[in-house]
Image (cartoon, helix red, strand yellow):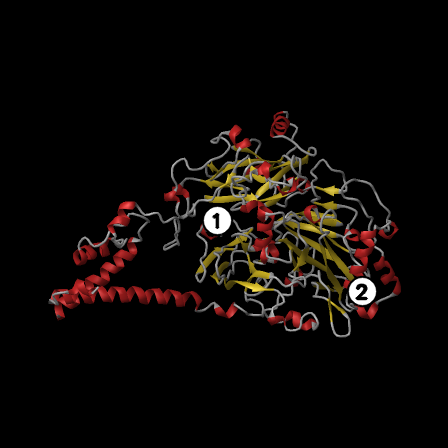
């Protein structure tokens, strides 16, 4: 810029000094900010010892809990694993991710799957610095189960509450752990959660505030169970294969706390070796609280049971319920359940079984996994009778697709040839390890009979062997959400539709032109609308939202959208503190499927759930409602943030829109949400929403006007004071910047600095 300083007058020299000082100050501040982001957080990046916030909770003594996350592309069975699994201890080395024994690319936080557990007390302040080390993707972290009241910008939803965190940049999440219970964090961008970017988030309460504190003796960090359905290739590869070719969307297996067995290894002596299983230790005579988190990403509900033990379920999605005894429970993607297990059986080893349903069932890959429940000192007190009993399941086996009772001993069933071959493989998997239970688990014998909570595609119409979610009773009794008549009622119907989705079809290969028909990809939509995310985040850049830009079934051509693909920013605008009822309907005409739905920023009461038939129409449900035939629990309905909907049926939920902001409501199956099975609730007016944090990142399209491009001039500073200096110095050198908001505090600070420097040079020059 030498040509700006011609003349070398004293005034020119003074302006030059002022300009250079301002630039230097700005650069120094930027470097200070970068260094500050990492200065006191690195101590927890790879720390193996418990975080100081994982403590006994004391009322009114909150802490600030700081964590550092590094999100990066990584690999299972990497060189960090050395000789795993041939040397089992190598599988537990730092940075070793064994998975199910298959090598594949993953997305990790701090090179762990699951990522670091955050364990805090209610009302602690959680601060997480998330550094994106992915090579070519943005990322965000959603804190599933935390409502983010007063901190809506921390919800972690790209293009709703924030911009994606760009590679090589760090974003600081800071929020209060307001919602107690079992929750989890996970990436909310693309399919990163499916590749391993998730971890537990446990919020405990002081003993005197815990309504269930007399029901168990121990609540241990080691008894958190985090589940996910798993593949031997990256989730993006599976997504592209399924949506653009003839690949399937069926999971291969499951992982329990990042571990499982789906591949056999051998050594030089031909011993059968395998990656380790998750293990959970108990001591006879005590009661333990277990926490189950389902981080699943495909249509794979998981049946959970423990051999020879029943369970007492005490919480769901972090909300306490009156205890329910069950032999097994079914968990859907995004759900959490807490149960108490009494260690009242003979000292031994027992299987904890995780059996995949729906797209994981016997029609496809029979995806299942096991973990080990290990009694302390079991080896010292083995007896033959206990081992004999362990070889034969003690429950009554029940076919879950109908109510036909089978033999009490599953070995009485005549196995198919496929089952015999499968058993031979499983015997090689499990029989060679002396530290495992002696029985051989497989998909068929992992079906648990007896009483089951949250059964697949069943509502309150089912018989006494199944406990539906609306049958549960919340510890928290009546509240305003349960008033007789809600302020809003929305019918949200969905299915898979035979339409030409332009994201997957084009000229010459329209839906009905694709051959064979099995390659025809159906599109899941809510009310025949696919969610189109904007190019900027709605909450922090709400001033950029054009009038009438939102859509729903009342603003689109309903008839046209049933024949052609409709995509727009699907949203409903709600008055603050209004009570909202959602009647969520699975029409069920296309497939026998199941969809769990998750609400951000709030929790709801599950007041009704029913399976009507193999399929149902919206008008049938509306007619049933008008006739008063939908049985609602308006007294003590359970509180959740994620719930399933029976195929060919409906689920009715109620929430109070008391948290101003923009909140996503979506199917929690990754492939469905990513192609638009979602909508947004705008709660309150803009002036009722929390102000945008200072210097909060902005993003959006860059589409300069043609005349600005022709002028060839750079953009002037957005700060008024600097613009005035630029006019004095450069004349008509730059174009005015009319975009974005201005932080006038920064401008006033610069004004003070520059004014002081003006007087300095005026006096001493």
Instruction: Tell me the residue that label 2 is attached to.
Output: 431
Residue 331's spot in the image, x, y percent? 67, 49
Residue 358's spot in the image, x, y percent? 69, 45
- Image quadrant occupied by the N terminus: bottom left
Image height of 224 relative to 248, above or below: below
Residue 551's spot in the image, x, y percent? 47, 35
- Image quadrant occupied by the C terminus: bottom left
Q: In this view of the protein, which residue sits in the foreground, 122 or 509? A: 509
Pointer 2: residues within 10 angstroms few (<14), some, or many (20+)? Answer: some
Instruction: Tell me the residue that label 1 is attached to.
Output: 149
Badge 2 marks a residue whose secondary structure is loop
Is residue 233 left or right of 279 when viewed as pictured?
left
Q: In this view of the protein, which residue sits in the foreground, 34 or 425? A: 425
Instruction: State which quadrant residue 51 falls in.
Output: bottom right
At 70% from the left and 66% from the top, the residue drawn is: 276
Badge 1 marks a residue whose secondary structure is loop
């Amino acid at each position: 810029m030498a040509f700006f300083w011609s003349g070398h007058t004293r005034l020119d020299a003074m302006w030059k000094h002022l300009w250079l000082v301002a630039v230097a100050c700005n650069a120094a501040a930027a470097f200070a900010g970068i260094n500050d982001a990492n200065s006191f957080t690195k101590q927890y990046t790879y720390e193996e010892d418990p975080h100081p916030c994982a403590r006994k909770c004391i009322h009114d003594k909150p802490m600030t809990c700081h964590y550092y996350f590094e999100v990066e592309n990584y690999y299972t069975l990497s060189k960090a694993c050395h000789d795993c699994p041939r040397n089992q201890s190598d599988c537990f080395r730092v940075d070793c991710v064994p998975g199910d024994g298959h090598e594949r690319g993953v997305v990790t936080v701090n090179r762990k799957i699951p990522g670091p557990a955050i364990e805090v007390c209610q009302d602690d302040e959680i601060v997480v610095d998330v550094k994106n080390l992915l090579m070519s993707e943005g990322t965000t972290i959603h804190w599933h189960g935390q409502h983010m009241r007063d901190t809506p910008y921390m919800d972690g939803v790209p293009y709703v509450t924030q911009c994606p965190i760009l590679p090589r940049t760090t974003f600081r999440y800071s929020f209060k752990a307001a919602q107690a219970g079992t929750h989890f964090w996970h990436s909310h961008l693309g399919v990163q959660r499916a590749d391993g970017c998730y971890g537990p988030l446990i919020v405990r309460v002081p003993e005197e505030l815990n309504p269930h504190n007399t029901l168990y003796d121990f609540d241990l960090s080691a008894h958190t169970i985090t589940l996910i359905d798993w593949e031997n290739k990256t989730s993006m590869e599976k997504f592209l294969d399924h949506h653009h070719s003839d690949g399937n969307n069926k999971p291969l297996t499951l992982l329990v706390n990042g571990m499982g067995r789906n591949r056999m290894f051998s050594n030089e002596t031909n011993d059968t070796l395998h990656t380790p299983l998750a293990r959970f230790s108990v001591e006879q005579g005590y009661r333990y609280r277990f926490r189950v988190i389902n981080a699943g990403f495909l249509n794979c509900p998981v049946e959970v049971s423990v051999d020879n033990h029943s369970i007492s379920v005490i919480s769901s999605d972090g909300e306490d319920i009156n205890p329910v005894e069950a032999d097994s429970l079914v968990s859907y993607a995004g759900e959490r359940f807490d149960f108490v297990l009494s260690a009242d059986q003979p000292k031994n080893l027992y299987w904890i079984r995780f059996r995949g349903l729906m797209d994981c069932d016997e029609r496809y890959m029979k995806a299942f996994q096991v973990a080990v429940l290990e009694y302390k000192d079991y080896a010292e007190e083995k007896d033959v009778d206990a081992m004999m009993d362990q070889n034969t399941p003690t429950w009554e086996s029940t076919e879950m697709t109908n109510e036909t009772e089978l033999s009490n001993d599953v070995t009485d069933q005549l196995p198919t040839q496929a089952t015999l071959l499968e058993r031979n493989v499983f015997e090689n998997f499990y029989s060679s390890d002396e530290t495992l239970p002696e029985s051989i688990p497989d998909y068929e014998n992992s079906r648990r009979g007896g009483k089951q909570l949250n059964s697949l595609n069943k509502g309150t119409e089912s018989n006494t062997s199944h406990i539906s979610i609306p049958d549960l009773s919340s510890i928290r009794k009546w509240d305003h959400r349960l008033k007789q008549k809600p302020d809003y009622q929305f019918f949200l119907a969905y299915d898979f539709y035979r339409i030409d989705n332009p994201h997957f079809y084009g000229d010459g290969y329209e839906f009905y032109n694709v051959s064979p028909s099995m390659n025809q990809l159906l599109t899941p939509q809510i009310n025949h609308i696919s969610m189109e995310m904007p190019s900027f985040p709605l909450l922090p850049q709400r001033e950029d939202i054009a009038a009438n830009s939102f859509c729903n079934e009342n603003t689109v051509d309903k008839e046209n959208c049933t024949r052609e693909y409709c995509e727009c920013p699907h949203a409903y605008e709600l008055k603050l503190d209004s009570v909202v009822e959602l009647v969520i309907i699975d029409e069920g005409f296309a497939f026998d499927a199941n969809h769990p739905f998750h609400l951000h920023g709030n929790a709801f009461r599950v007041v009704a759930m029913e399976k009507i038939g193999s399929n149902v129409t919206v008008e049938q449900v509306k007619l049933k409602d008008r006739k008063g035939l939908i049985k609602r629990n308006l007294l003590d309905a359970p509180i959740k943030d994620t719930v399933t909907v029976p195929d060919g049926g409906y689920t009715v939920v109620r929430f109070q829109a008391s948290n101003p902001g923009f909140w996503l409501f979506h199917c929690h199956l990754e492939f469905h949400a990513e192609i638009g099975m979602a909508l947004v609730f705008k709660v309150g007016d803009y002036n009722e929403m929390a102000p945008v944090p200072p210097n909060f990142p902005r993003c959006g399209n860059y589409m300069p006007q043609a005349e600005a491009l022709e002028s060839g001039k750079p953009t002037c500073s957005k700060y008024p004071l600097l613009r005035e200096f630029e006019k004095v110095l450069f004349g008509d050198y730059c174009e005015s910047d009319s975009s974005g908001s201005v932080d006038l505090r920064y401008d006033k600070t610069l004004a003070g600095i520059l004014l002081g420097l003006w007087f300095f040079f005026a006096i001493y020059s």
